[in-house]
Image: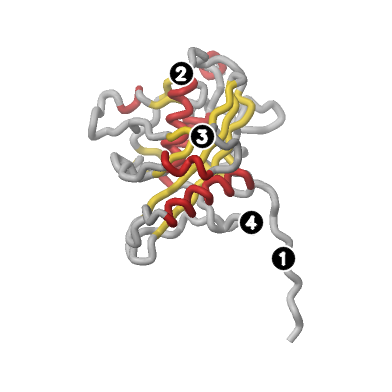
């Protein structure tokens, strides 16, 4: 039997969160990339460093027996530079799991990581404020519809790590006093979806398919719908004058 030639791994960032650069942005109505790009971050991709970082959190939590055999949770990490300030954030989709004690295990930018566990807007908590509590990565308020493309946005307790990371980033930018100011140099993110061996109900459809990171993941469909609203940094006057 002839030996098959081993596949050359794809070393590029190959997981995209929130759609593709070629999509039209639901917030501003502009194409997210193109010959005259208006978005600093047309799509969210991961990197080897971030894949390693989320893996270090995962392995530390496993060693500490913090991930139950029947659990189904999303772990995530994010790095960004906005207005000259660098941000390094980590989150878990479950509000019952604290990733804080495990951030010291991350070797990439060791000691710079912070927990992202913001209050995610919930229609159950306050339907009237739902559309005013979201912030873009530049700290500007943005409306997100309760449904998009016929898909209902998840309610309380149904939030991937990505949304927590982006919302925390927007909050921190707003708190810095640079709300809406400064350039967005980059925003990168990686997620890992853990499904315990005793969990028979959780979906496994979000696992990545890249040659180098098939064990990492992208967000669920409804969360992917929200992400474009949060990474859009197009200024209001560009939207109003379009």
Answer few, some or many: residues within 10 Å of disc 4's Cα (few below 14, many 20 plus, some between 14 and 19).
some
Residue at image location 57% in from the left, 58% down from the top: 214
Which residue does the numbered mark 1 point to in the structure image?
7
Q: Going from the N terminus, do you reach mark 2 or mark 1 first?
A: 1
Q: Quadrant of the C terminus?
A: top right
- Residue 81 x/y as whole percent: 60, 27
Which residue does the numbered mark 4 point to in the structure image?
212
Q: Going from the N terminus, do you reach mark 4 or mark 3 first?
A: 3
Specify the label residue 113 is tagged with: 3
**Cα distance between the residues tagged 1 and 3:** 35 Å
Which residue does the numbered mark 2 point to in the structure image?
174
- For the residue pair 169 and 222, the one nearer the viewer reads as 169
- Residue 182 x/y as whole percent: 59, 17
Specify the label residue 108 is tagged with: none
**Cα distance between the residues tagged 3 and 2:** 19 Å
Residue at image location 55% in from the left, 40% down from the top: 189
Q: Nearer the viewer, mark 3 or mark 2?
A: 3
**Cα distance between the residues tagged 2 and 1:** 45 Å
Answer few, some or many: residues within 10 Å of disc 1's Cα (few below 14, many 20 plus, some between 14 and 19).
few
| SS state under label 4 | loop
């Amino acid at each position: 039997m002839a030996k098959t030639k081993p596949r050359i791994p794809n070393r590029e960032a190959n997981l995209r969160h929130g759609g593709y650069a070629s999509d039209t942005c639901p917030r501003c109505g502009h194409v997210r990339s193109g010959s005259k790009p208006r978005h600093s971050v047309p799509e969210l991709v991961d990197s080897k460093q971030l894949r390693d970082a989320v893996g270090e959190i995962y392995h530390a939590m496993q060693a500490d027996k913090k991930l139950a055999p029947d659990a189904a949770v999303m772990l995530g990490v994010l790095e960004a530079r906005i207005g000259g300030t660098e941000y390094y954030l980590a989150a878990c989709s479950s509000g019952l799991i604290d990733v804080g004690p495990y951030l010291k295990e991350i070797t990439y930018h060791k000691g710079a990581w912070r927990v992202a566990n913001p209050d995610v807007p919930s229609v159950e908590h306050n339907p009237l404020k739902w559309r005013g509590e979201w912030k873009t990565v530049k700290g500007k308020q943005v409306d997100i519809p309760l449904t998009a493309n016929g898909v209902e946005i998840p309610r309380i307790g149904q939030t991937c790590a990505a949304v927590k990371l982006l919302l925390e980033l927007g909050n921190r930018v707003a708190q810095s006093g640079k709300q809406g100011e400064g350039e967005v140099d980059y925003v990168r993110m990686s997620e890992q979806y853990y499904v315990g061996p005793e969990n028979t109900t959780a979906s496994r459809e979000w696992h990545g398919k890249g040659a180098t990171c098939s064990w990492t993941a992208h967000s669920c469909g409804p969360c992917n719908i929200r992400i474009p609203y949060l990474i859009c940094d197009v200024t209001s006057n560009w939207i109003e004058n379009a």
